[in-house]
């Protein structure tokens, strides 16, 4: 971000920015009661937030804000120190030192929060201006953006990423630490690490409304696999770059008539191809293991849903007549909707827009429901899934219902693809 783009943005956001009389009044220091300078404070606070959102950062340096952002020919706002102090006291700003260490325990983080609240009101402007500050509102928005991006590439309820991946998404290690600290404080993320030949750090993030689950040994193994996957991908990129350089050098040597040098580059190309094949093979094996783990997690969710459904049927003591009546009412409702749709298509009403009709049908669908009882055929890779299927069959048999056979044999499952309704399908299956 250069000074010219900042000036252009200020003139666009504040139409009277170059007005001398207005600027002089805005640049004056605060005086009197808060009611006297409240409008001026809100102006500077909102302007700082708009600038941060526009240029995409949530960390600011007070000296840069004062001397570069709002510098008008050598004049800087005299009230800016007070603005930052009020923002800090009201929770709009926080220091980097105030961030909780995500690798520490929850009790330690709680004590740190209490300490920060006790010392916040005693902070002086000089102490605040010495460090970089974090805009809490923009930090929250950045954390939500990170979770959204992860949700688009993962279809499970939680995911694990390396710290390097998180840093690339946040814009740097300090920014990633701030985002992780915020998510950890909200219970949406948890730091994890594992030591193989070197320390591997990562983050487990919850992609649902629920809090992130505790770290398990499987999570550490998955982190190591993901780290290996990233390393292999980096190695592939390096090999591709060398291959391209050797290819260009070989072509240049042939054009210049130096066949001996061209042959040497040709050997390098062959070695690069062989290295790429080996690296690709290892990468495919790692990805295959990750896919198997993701499929196993999906099977576990289906198994848990089957258990919950069978237990609910036992506890509620649902009778055969109640189940049959529910199914009959559902069939009648669906049939009535089909008849209504055919009637509207054959004889549409005049003066009624299609959008209104569609809206009414959506309301009817919400009231009546269109869920059909579907056969569950969960793929199972362990004994728990088979036992869960038998449990549901026993529960239905006790109600004297004809239950469909649930095939518990394993079969090849495709690579997991992110689908927005995948979690709802599992609940419907229950």
Image: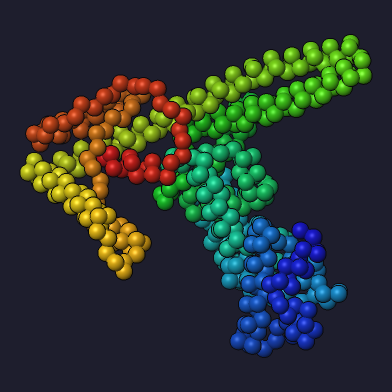
Residue 170, visible in the rendered structure: yes
Nearest to the observer: residue 173 or residue 209 = 209
Q: Position of residue 303 (x, y in %)?
A: 30, 33
The residue at the point 42 percent across, 51 percent down is: 209
56 vs 396: above or below: below
In the image, residue 241 sits, relative to residue 178, either above or below, namely above
Against 18, residue 335 (above or below) is above
Q: Residue at x 51, y 44 (%)?
A: 152
> Is residue 319 visible in the rendered structure shown here?
no
Q: Is residue 300 left or right of residue 30?
A: left
The image quarter containing residue 252 is top right
**Quarter in which the N terminus is drawn:** bottom right
**Which residue is at a point 57% across and 36% down the rendered structure image?**
193
322 over 199 or under it: above or below: below
Q: Give residue 363's position: percent from left, percent from top.
A: 28, 60
Give the percent coordinates (x, y) of residue 328. 12, 46
Question: In the drawing, does residue 69 fall left or right of residue 231?
Answer: right
Q: How many marks?
A: 0
Residue depicted at 25% across the width and 46% down the height: 371
Left or right of 219: which side holds 132? Answer: right
Between residue 265 and residue 382, name the one nearer to us. Answer: 265
């Amino acid at each position: 971000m250069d000074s010219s783009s900042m000036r252009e943005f200020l003139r666009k956001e504040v139409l009277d920015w170059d007005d001398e009389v207005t600027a002089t009044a805005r640049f004056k220091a605060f005086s009197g009661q808060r009611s006297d300078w409240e409008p001026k404070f809100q102006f500077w606070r909102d302007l700082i937030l708009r600038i941060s959102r526009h240029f995409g950062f949530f960390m600011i340096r007070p000296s840069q804000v004062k001397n570069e952002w709002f510098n008008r020919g050598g004049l800087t706002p005299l009230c800016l120190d007070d603005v930052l102090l009020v923002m800090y006291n009201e929770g709009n700003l926080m220091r980097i030192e105030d961030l909780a260490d995500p690798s520490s325990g929850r009790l330690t983080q709680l004590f740190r929060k209490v300490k920060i609240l006790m010392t916040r009101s005693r902070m002086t402007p000089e102490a605040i201006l010495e460090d970089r500050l974090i805009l809490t509102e923009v930090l929250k928005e950045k954390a939500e953006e990170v979770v959204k991006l992860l949700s688009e590439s993962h279809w499970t309820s939680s995911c694990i990423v390396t710290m390097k991946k998180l840093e690339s998404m946040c814009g740097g290690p300090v920014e990633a630490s701030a985002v992780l600290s915020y998510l950890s404080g909200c219970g949406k993320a948890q730091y994890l690490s594992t030591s193989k030949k070197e320390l591997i750090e990562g983050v487990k993030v919850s992609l649902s409304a629920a809090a992130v689950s505790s770290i398990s040994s499987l999570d550490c193994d998955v982190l190591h696999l993901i780290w290996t996957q990233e390393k292999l991908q980096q190695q592939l990129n390096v090999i591709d770059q060398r291959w391209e350089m050797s290819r260009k050098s070989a072509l240049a040597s042939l054009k210049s008539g130096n066949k001996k040098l061209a042959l040497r580059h040709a050997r390098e190309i062959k070695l690069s191809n062989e290295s790429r094949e080996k690296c690709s093979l290892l990468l495919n094996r790692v990805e295959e293991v990750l896919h198997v783990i993701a499929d196993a997690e999906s099977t576990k969710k289906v198994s848990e849903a089957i258990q919950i459904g069978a237990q609910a049927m036992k506890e509620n003591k649902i009778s055969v007549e109640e189940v049959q009546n529910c199914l009959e009412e559902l069939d009648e409702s669906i049939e009535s909707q089909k008849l209504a749709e055919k009637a509207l298509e054959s004889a549409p009403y005049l003066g009624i827009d299609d959008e209104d009709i569609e809206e009414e049908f959506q309301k009817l669908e919400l009231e009546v429901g269109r869920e059909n009882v579907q056969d569950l055929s969960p793929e199972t890779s362990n004994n728990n899934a088979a036992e869960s299927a038998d449990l549901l069959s026993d529960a239905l048999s006790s109600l004297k219902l004809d239950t469909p056979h649930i095939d518990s044999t394993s079969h090849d499952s495709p690579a997991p693809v992110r689908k927005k309704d995948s979690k709802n399908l599992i609940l419907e299956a229950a």
